[in-house]
Image: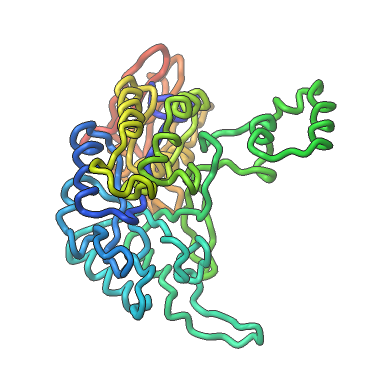
Amino acid sequence: MKILKYPHPYKAWLSISNDPDNTTYNNWKELNEFIWELLELPFGDAFFIENNNFNLPDQVCLKKNPEIIRKHFHDSMHFWGDYQHSRNKNFDREDAINCIKFLKENNINPTVWVDHSFHIANIIHANGIGAKKQLIDASGIEYNNFQYTLDLVIEAGIKYIWGGNISKVIGQDRKIYYSEFLKSKKINVFKRFIYSLLKPFNFFKTIIPEDIFKNKQLWINEFPDENKIYCFERHGTWEDANIDGLAKVISTQNINELIKNTGTSIIYTHLGKRKKERIKDKNHIPEETKNALIYLKDQYDKKELNLSPISTMLDYLIVRDNVTIDNKNKIVNFSSDGIRFKKLVYEDLAQHAFSFFSKNINAWKIVLNGEKTNYTITTSNNIHTITFNDK
């Protein structure tokens, strides 16, 4: 018995991590109508709770545009709002407390956190002060940090935090070879000569160890306040993180390579942001990006590429990686990871499908935390896909 990486017959998995910077309401409407209503792409979205940016006063945010949360699924929050260029409105822990109150009053339950720009109170990106209860100066004197909010991030229900970097590798959740790693690096003449000597010994076909180069989609991170939370990787480039550059990041060539690589990808972008030269264009979404999104839809319909919100992908990966297969007693046990799922329950499995390769699935028991559970099996060429029934 062997568990497949992704639900059969999907070969790869893609999600979009959209930062709502620069998104006006008109642009938001165009994005919603094309991506979520016309194409019906099953992505999640991100929101600002409030907007205090004096340079971008027309940005969409929940306190000003509460209706957006009902139009399509949102699982990500971008910091506690936009406090960049906020002039005399400095961010304080009290702002986060008020934001949590707003989320609870409106039954909004995000599970994904993404730091915003270079704000000093980010949890990881740029500064990471938001994860430190106290600050220590060069003389060793300690101060209370009134911008510490990681405990409040957790209270808000966040289970995943962006790791702060952008990967250019196409496809995470997979091993890579030295040859692919070196292609992405600038190599001087001397190093090229050394590598040419190693080539006959199949050096380039060797899988690169994780201690040299990590290509994980998510990992457990211990923060300065001793909280342990999963972090995740985003893919793309800083310069292409807008509605124009998205066409390049999810080009047909790149999507085909992702499928070939059998990996996951969480695309970093700002769907509401345009390149400077297109600021005055009537249409927000350029034709190149529309065509790229249509190709995503095509691959999804063909069941080559799975699409989902970030939280759905990451939840699946955690459950998958904590499945234990007892070949001697022929038992497949779904169990908790102890962090994201303190105790794995039936409802956590019901939204997913899990595929296994086995010549005789009927000889196996499928259990949850060692106990019997209800499920359905569909089979195709010794690949058995398990879905969990209503209790």
Quadrant placement of the C terminus: top left
Instruction: Quadrant for residue 177, please give it.
Output: top right
Q: Is residue 1 visible?
A: no
Please say if 95 is above or below 284.
below
Quadrant of residue 44 in the image? Answer: top left
Q: Position of residue 70 (x, y in %)?
A: 16, 50
Display colour scheme: rainbow
Residue 187 shown left or right of residue 368 in the figure: right
Residue 129 position in % (x across, y down): 50, 71
In this view, the residue in front, 255 or 211, is 255
**Residue 47 coordinates in the image, percent (x, y):** 29, 56
Q: Measuring 28% from the left and 26% from the top, which residue is drawn there?
A: 376
Residue at position x 55%, y 40% from top? 168
Counting every numbered tag in the picture gives: 0
Q: Is residue 173 visible?
A: yes
**Horizontal side of residue 388 vs 268, given as left or right:** left
Q: At x 46% / y 35%, what residue is drawn?
A: 264
Q: Nearer the viewer, residue 11 or 86?
A: 86
Q: What x and y, as percent, mark residue 260?
A: 50, 23
Q: Name the residue at the top extreme.
A: 381
Query: 383 and 334: which one is in front?
Result: 383
- Residue at left 43%, top 76%? 147
On screen, residue 251 above or below 339: above
Q: Is residue 359 left or right of residue 32?
A: right
